[in-house]
Image (tube, grey):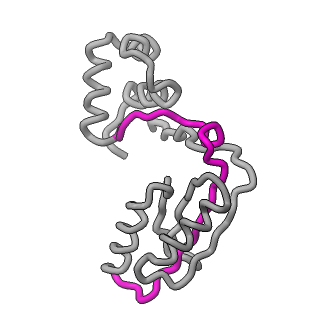
Amino acid sequence: MPNLDKFDLAILECLQEDARATNVEIAEKVNLSPSPCLRRIRNLEKTGVIRGYRADIDRKEVGLGLTVFVELKVAHHSRENAQAQEAALLAIPEVVSCFLISGTADFLAEVVVEDLAAYERLLTDTLLTLPNVSDIRSNFAIRSMKTHGALKLPELK
């Protein structure tokens, strides 16, 4: 774990709860004055602990009603093939998260699209044309209970 202290962890908790909170509001919650609080936030950003800020958009409210977890198996395992597959998956806008995994598949991609017809187009026009893919399995989410949850931050010892 990076060299985070109780103030850093408290700041991260506050930002996970409300990333639009002002520096003064965060400083009050974590018992720091605003200047050191802002320095800490900037340091967390600079070191990559905080990767960015974004809106949490309701998928259904913007017409993205289908979430699919796609398992992809790569033929001819090699570092080059894995890197090519990773780059190809990262370039697909409908892929909102992607993991290199162990088990029966090599990659697990979370895909968000409008509906089944949109997924069929993505599957046939894009996913099935990816380099070195030997198998694709699609798992459809029936209902989302929790997406983009806050991280359970480690406790200091």
Q: Main secondary structure of the magenta part?
A: loop
Camera-side residue: 6 or 58? Answer: 58
Q: Is residue 146 magenta?
A: no
Q: Position of residue 13 (x, y in %)?
A: 48, 29
Q: Quadrant of residue 150?
A: top right
Question: Picture quarter containing residue 26?
Answer: top left
Tell me the residue at 50%/56% (across/down). Answer: 94
Decide: is 32 above or below 87.
above
Q: Residue at x 26, y 31 (%)?
A: 43
Residue farthest toward the right in the current orientation of the protein = 142
Residues drawn in magenta = 49-78
80 on left or right of 142: left
Find residue 46 and report its horizontal and vertical position in percent. 24, 36
Could you tell me how many numbered marks the image carries? 0
Quadrant the C terminus occupies:
top left
In the depicted structure, whether residue 138 falls above or below residue 54? below
Q: Residue at x 56, y 70 (%)?
A: 123
Examine the rendered structure and indicate whether residue 87 appears above or below residue 65: below
Nearer-the-camera pick, 22 or 119: 119
Residue 114: where, in percent of width, then height?
Answer: 62, 52
64 horizontally vs 29: left or right: right
Identify whether 81 is placed above or below 88: below
**Residue 50 located within the stretch drawn in magenta:** yes
Residue 82 in percent (x, y) is at 38, 76
